[in-house]
Amino acid sequence: MPYIPHSDADRESMLETIGVPSLEDLFEDIPESARFPDLDLPAALSEIGARWELGSLAEANLTTAEGSCFLGAGAYRHFVPAVVDAVISRGEFFTAYTPYQPEVSQGTLQAIFEYQTMICELTGMDVSNASHYDGATSTAEAVITAVNIHRMRRKKVLLSRFVHPEYRQVVRSYTQGMDLTIEDVEPAELMDELDKETACVIVQYPDFLGRFEDLSDMAEAVQDVGAIFVVVTDPVALGLLKPPGAFGADIVTGEGQGLGIGMSFGGPYLGFFAAKKKHVRKIAGRLVGQTEDADGERGFVLTLATREQHIRRERATSNICTNQGLMALAAAVHMSALGKCGLRQVAELCYHKAHYAADEIDALDGFSVLRDKPFFKEFVVRCPQPVAEINDALLRRRAIMGGYDLGQSYPDLEDHMLLCVTEMNPRQEIDLLVETLEEVTS
């Protein structure tokens, strides 16, 4: 809880300066329903008293540290090695600003360079930028990149229906005013919708329902019409699955939260962005490159920064001119600590535990698991009653966070739950979930 030193006189002076009669008037443009709730605190509390009071209110919130969690849908509970927080908490990184002066920013620049290198190895791509805010904005930036590659001559964007629903919403919000035609398409119909007006095709691998398949044929079809093939992926899955670069992706984006970043109630997160080398001058954000100094020693500098808004202004590739640098550092430390074998082991644990859970749930009366395609760590379960009722019972009876109610985003999947199992779910938790599902629906 921060210490706020402003006195009543200070507040009155500031309000007078900006020409607002009262503190309430300062927030008049914000609907009352969206303002801070009334906490009904005593009129006057000491600092320690306020801490106790707020702490007791916070205890009403169940966290993943206190109960079992099988909720995924874009934010995942993965193990974060202690070395990650130890490194990113160092003052040199924790307080660092944009490294525009390479001579005094070599540590930050090298960390970003190593992050970019590992993202390229993981995705099978040639180049990576220094990250975006989250997976949704990196996907939206991929659309803008594709349109810029075609010099705005192509305005049609095809989105697989099973790309994360929130990512699809952000793509629309992000590109409004660009006069694009954005279509949500069934995966099986994507190739039929391709034509010479298509700027890009976006698919997710594994998709929002957790399923994956070889996308080589789709990549070939997309490139045959000269469009850009964008793949949204889970970096944890790439510890086990074929990387998108191996089947012809032009751009790979995704959410890097699973790489050493806690769930943190929704952020800050990390959007990664990798592409083929031929598209490097159209990529938004910053890239760090390796060079040599006057003495022939290895050094690191920001490269291709002329595309950013602070330099090119209205001709900039994107409004993105910064990044989640501390989150990129966390991901770099995490990938370095686990290494190739560790990343594969995590992916294998997710895969096998998810399949064990799916088999056990599939055997329950009234439940059935969707098995039309292979799945990684998330899978769809058809439930015998509304998902909201089941989740409420799971939470009340066993402090279990159930799956995502797919009916919220897909009306045809009403009473279907998206469950997620990671390396953080021991067999005892999975068995308790299965036992409780049987109890609450019998």
Image (cartoon, rainbow, N blue to C red):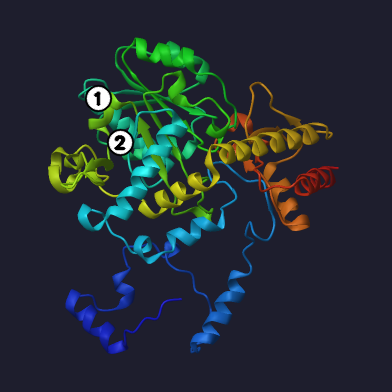
- Residue 122, percent from left and from top: 47, 33
Q: Residue furthest front?
A: 295
Q: Residue at x 48, y 89 (%)?
A: 44
Q: Residue at x 84, y 34 (%)?
A: 365
- The quarter of the image holding the C terminus is top right
- Residue 419, percent from left and from top: 66, 40
Say above or below: 305 vs 380.
below
- Assess disc 1: are there few (<14), some (14-19) or many (≥20) residues with their C-alpha within 10 Å of its C-alpha: some
- From the viewer's perspective, tell me whether residue 101 is left or right of residue 357: left
- From the viewer's perspective, tell me whether residue 13 is left or right of residue 238: left
- Residue 120, percent from left and from top: 40, 33
* Amino acid residing under circle 1: Ile
- Assess disc 2: are there few (<14), some (14-19) or many (≥20) residues with their C-alpha within 10 Å of its C-alpha: some
Query: Which label is found at residue 251?
Result: none
- From the viewer's perspective, tell me whether residue 392 is left or right of residue 309: right
Query: Which label is found at residue 149?
Result: 1
- Residue 351, percent from left and from top: 66, 34
On the question of residue 285 being in view, the answer is no
Q: Residue 5 appears in which quarter of the rendering? A: bottom left
On the question of residue 1 being in view, the answer is yes
Q: Secondary structure at mark 2?
A: loop
Of labels 2 and 1, earlier in sequence is 1
Q: Residue at x 53, y 86 (%)?
A: 48
Q: Secondary structure at mark 1?
A: helix
Q: Nearer the viewer, residue 114 or 98?
A: 114
Q: Indicate which label's residue lies in the foreground, 2 or 1.
A: 1
Query: Which label is found at residue 175?
Result: 2
Q: Residue 361 appears in which quarter of the rendering? A: top right
Q: CA distance from mark 2 to mark 1?
A: 15 Å
- From the viewer's perspective, tell me whether residue 269 is left or right of residue 224: right
* Amino acid residing under circle 2: Thr
Q: Residue at x 54, y 37 (%)?
A: 340
